Amino acid sequence: MNINFKDDIETTKDAVVSESEFDQERMIEAILFATTEPLSLKEITKRMPENANPRVALDSLRKKYENRGFRIVKILDSYAFRTATDLSYLLQNHVVEKRRLSKAALEVLAIVAYHKSSTRAEIEEIRGVSVSTGTLDLLMETGWITLGPRRLTPGRPITFLVTESFLDHFGLKSTQDLPGINELRETGLLDRRSMSLEEIKVDNLDKEPVS
């Protein structure tokens, strides 16, 4: 009788590795399911054992959930469970509109979204009218824009950026995935009577992801 102990050892080792990967996937599922905000890979790693490799487990999980009712989506550098986009209509009756943004707020939001960053003066130049402090405060209160770095120009004006919450709300991975103006109007982000494509100057914008 010929017993190959080497094969038995390798088989056992493979089983241990496989079980470890399965456990890591379960850990990530639990972490993402329990959180209300998208988590970065760094934040997920902090919550897992030292020998874990969450990047590999995340890639494996994202493939497994590709055709399910909910998916693991990447938003900038963070991850979260989200309903599959083709099934979002099932939840529409449960969405509560807390506050309807004014036409001015929607225009300011669109300008900031399509620019990597915008100062107040730049927003006013594009719109042709002044921007009230209340409009900017409302957008920041909504969580869709935030303060960015100051420009290295005279006066060092502050810039405004769209937030991760904005991208998450509209199902975008980054500002590179922003739709066209007509699509924005259909989603309600822009009023149908608001600015034209040329006025927002989309063709001349640098559409790199927000950093």
Image (cartoon, rainbow, N blue to C red):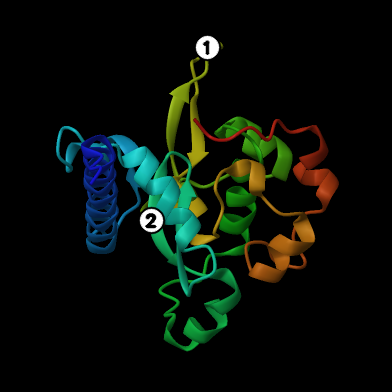
Q: Position of residue 93 (x, y in %)?
A: 48, 88
Give the CA separation, mark 2 to mark 1.
Answer: 35 Å
Which of the numbered marks, if any, corresponds to residue 30? none
Secondary element at image label 2: strand
13 left or right of 106 in image? left
Determine crowd level at label 2: few under 14, some 14-19, many 20+ residues with C-alpha closer than 10 A.
many
Which amino acid lies under the numbered mark 1 shown in the image of this protein?
A: Leu
In the image, residue 98 lies at what x, y percent? 40, 74
Q: Nearer the viewer, residue 22 or 115?
A: 22
Disc 1: which residue: 152
Q: Who is closer to the viewer here, 163 or 146?
A: 163
Residue at 66% of width from left, 50% of height from top?
178
* Element carrying mark 1: loop
Vertical relation: 176 (above or below) 116: below
Which residue is at a point 14% across and 39% down the rendered structure image? Answer: 49
Residue appearing at x 44%, y 46% in the figure: 59
Could you say which disc has been placed on residue 80 in the image?
2
